[in-house]
Amino acid sequence: MAGDVVFVLNHPQMSTEVRNWDLVAKEMEAAGATSSQMYVRAKALAQGKLDPMPTSFPEAPYSISAVAG
């Protein structure tokens, strides 16, 4: 339909959390905000790497969702 925004996911095999981190990293890049630890974290998690920032849940190195609740 005219005027609709369509998002095409380049990586359908990504989990929702990894896709979200990928979006965060890309938005930060677009804003020129690449010198923060949050950007470093977002970029690493978007690439499927271990979380570079310590968490209180070492058994979940790819996720910070456990500390939010």
Image (cartoon, helix red, strand yellow):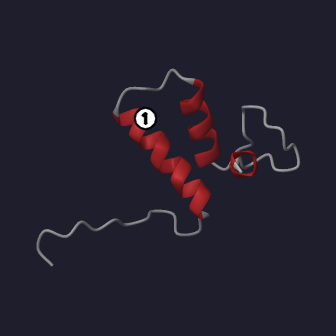
Position of 22 with respect to 9 (left or right) is right
Q: Residue furthest top?
A: 35
Disc 1: which residue: 28
Against 35, is 66 above or below? Answer: below
Q: Position of residue 37 (x, y in %)?
A: 60, 25
Q: Residue furthest front?
A: 69
Q: Position of residue 58 (x, y in %)?
A: 87, 43
Taking the spot 53% from the left edge, 57% from the top edge, the residue there is: 19
Q: Position of residue 24 (x, y in %)?
A: 48, 43
Q: Residue furthest bottom?
A: 1
Q: Residue furthest left?
A: 2
The amino acid type of the residue labelled 1 equals: Met
Against 11, is 34 above or below? Answer: above
Position of 22 with respect to 50 (left or right) is left
Q: Position of residue 66 (x, y in %)?
A: 75, 51
Q: Nearer the viewer, residue 10 or 21?
A: 21
Q: Quadrant of the N terminus?
A: bottom left
Disc 1 is placed on an element classified as helix
Taking the spot 49% from the left edge, 40% from the top edge, the residue there is: 25
Taking the spot 13% from the left edge, 68% from the top edge, the residue there is: 3
Crowding at label 1, few (<14), some or many (≥20) Cα neighbours within 10 Å?
Answer: some
Taking the spot 74% from the left edge, 45% from the top edge, the residue there is: 67
Total number of numbered discs in the rendering: 1
